[in-house]
Image: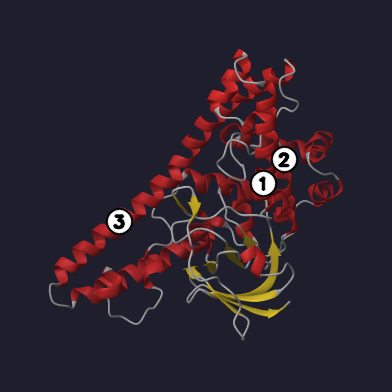
């Protein structure tokens, strides 16, 4: 409201610019930078680059032990794991694997980053973003100070900007703690899951995810009908798999138990333009890569437009190589939006984007006005 009703300067992107970048480094930044350095090691080593191309997943990390440069890389990677072993998951739900559980997570991200050229270092990107924020903030302060009640307006503006930046910093720093707590819970629940399998109650180690805690407890105690429990697992897994692949997405809102009308359906106009909400400034043209899940991240190449349902910290490595982002859910404070602003990428929130845009199409993403223009495809 302050920038809309008080600020009368000529910067249409001032709102995004004063909230881009952070005045201090967070644990999330340190994790991302440490991982970027690992990928940079591969980029600058012919041996490591050859190994990451030849061996996939866990086999890559195993093969590293047989080479001097590989052992040096493993030493640094293990230091990284000591700090971030419980992270890297595609979504905060405990169903999704952490990097310590699935080496493929880091392998795919390392392979993707190692084959990209001319990557901007996180330090360089951080410096540019902070400079832009400081310039925009100073410009708003100068603009407000010349108005009636200027001192009061400036004080209110400074308070709200500082509060917002502290909030963003706190949110980033809270995620590692949240992730370690949920991982500890996951380990306990996985033991329950193993017991359901060892006792012949359920068939697969992942079946327990589709029962509530009460249902799982009753099943182990013998008070939950076995046939009913297995039927619940089968039905819920089917629905979950549809969501996981985004063949069917649940409604964004419910009114009672019924889907709430989300308003007028979004479609392409005669000029091939889709109208969403811009969440990070700038415009870029590029090839679409629809990435339904984190395991598909290896399909991305430098300059691609990432089109996805949404992102979480496990997706961060993709932002180093993509040219822009279009996500189906989330607003200005969504992970993809905040990260796009940090990386200087145009971003748009567009419901049903994965169905409205074809993989391989060439599009223009305009984060200033929220438009996605289909050029071809």
The disc at residue 38 is: 1
Tell me: 90 left or right of 7: right
Q: Which residue is mark 3?
A: 162
Image point (41%, 55%), residue name: 22
Q: Position of residue 367 (x, y in %)?
A: 51, 72
Vertical comparison of 310 with 66: above or below: below
Q: Which residue is located at x 76 percent, y 26 percent?
A: 203
Q: Nearer the viewer, residue 6 or 212?
A: 212
**x and y, in percent, of residue 116 in the image:** 72, 61
* Viewport quadrant of the N terminus: bottom left
| Precedes in sequence: disc 2 or disc 3 | 2
Q: Is residue 367 above or below residue 84?
A: below
In the image, what residue occupies the spot 21% across and 67% down? 154
Q: How far from the left and from the top, in percent, is residue 331?
A: 46, 61
From the viewer's perspective, tell me whether residue 109 is left or right of residue 372.
right
Which residue position holds label 2? 73
Q: Do the CB atoms of the residues marked 1 and 2 lie less than 8 Å apart?
A: yes
Q: In x, y percent, where is residue 29? A: 51, 49
In the image: residue 23, left or right of residue 108: left
């Amino acid at each position: 409201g302050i920038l809309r009703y008080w600020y009368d300067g000529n910067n249409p992107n001032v709102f995004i610019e004063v909230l881009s970048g952070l005045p201090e480094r967070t644990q999330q930044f340190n994790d991302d930078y440490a991982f970027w350095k690992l990928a940079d090691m591969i980029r600058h080593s012919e041996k490591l680059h050859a190994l990451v191309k030849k061996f996939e997943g866990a086999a890559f990390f195993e093969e590293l032990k047989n080479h001097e440069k590989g052992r040096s890389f493993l030493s640094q990677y293990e230091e990284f794991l000591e700090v971030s072993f419980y992270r890297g998951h595609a979504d905060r739900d405990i169903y999704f694997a952490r990097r310590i559980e699935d080496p493929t997570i880091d392998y795919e991200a390392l392979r993707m980053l190692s084959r990209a050229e001319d990557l901007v270092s996180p330090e360089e990107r951080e410096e540019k973003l902070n400079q832009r924020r400081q310039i925009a903030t100073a410009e708003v302060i100068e603009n407000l100070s010349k108005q009636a009640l200027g001192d009061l307006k400036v004080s209110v503006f400074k308070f709200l900007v500082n509060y917002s930046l502290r909030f963003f910093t706190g949110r980033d720093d809270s995620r590692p703690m949240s992730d370690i707590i949920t991982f500890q819970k996951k380990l306990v629940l996985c033991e329950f899951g193993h017991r359901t399998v060892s006792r012949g109650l359920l068939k697969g180690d992942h079946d327990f995810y589709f029962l509530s805690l009460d249902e799982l407890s009753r099943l182990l105690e013998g008070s939950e009908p076995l046939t009913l429990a297995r039927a619940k697992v089968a039905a819920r897994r089917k629905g979950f798999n549809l969501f996981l692949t985004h063949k069917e997405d649940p409604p964004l809102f419910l009114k009672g138990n019924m889907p709430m009308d989300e308003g007028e359906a979004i479609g392409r106009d005669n000029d091939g333009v889709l109208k969403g909400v811009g969440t990070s400034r700038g415009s870029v043209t590029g090839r679409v890569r629809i990435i339904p899940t984190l395991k598909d991240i290896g399909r991305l190449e430098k300059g691609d437009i990432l089109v996805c349902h949404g992102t979480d910290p496990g997706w961060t490595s993709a932002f180093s190589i993509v040219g822009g982002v279009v996500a189906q859910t989330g607003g200005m404070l969504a992970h993809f939006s905040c990260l796009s602003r940090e990386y200087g990428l145009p971003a748009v929130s567009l419901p049903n984007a994965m169905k409205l845009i074809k993989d391989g199409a060439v599009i223009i993403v305009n984060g200033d006005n929220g438009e996605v223009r289909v050029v071809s495809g």
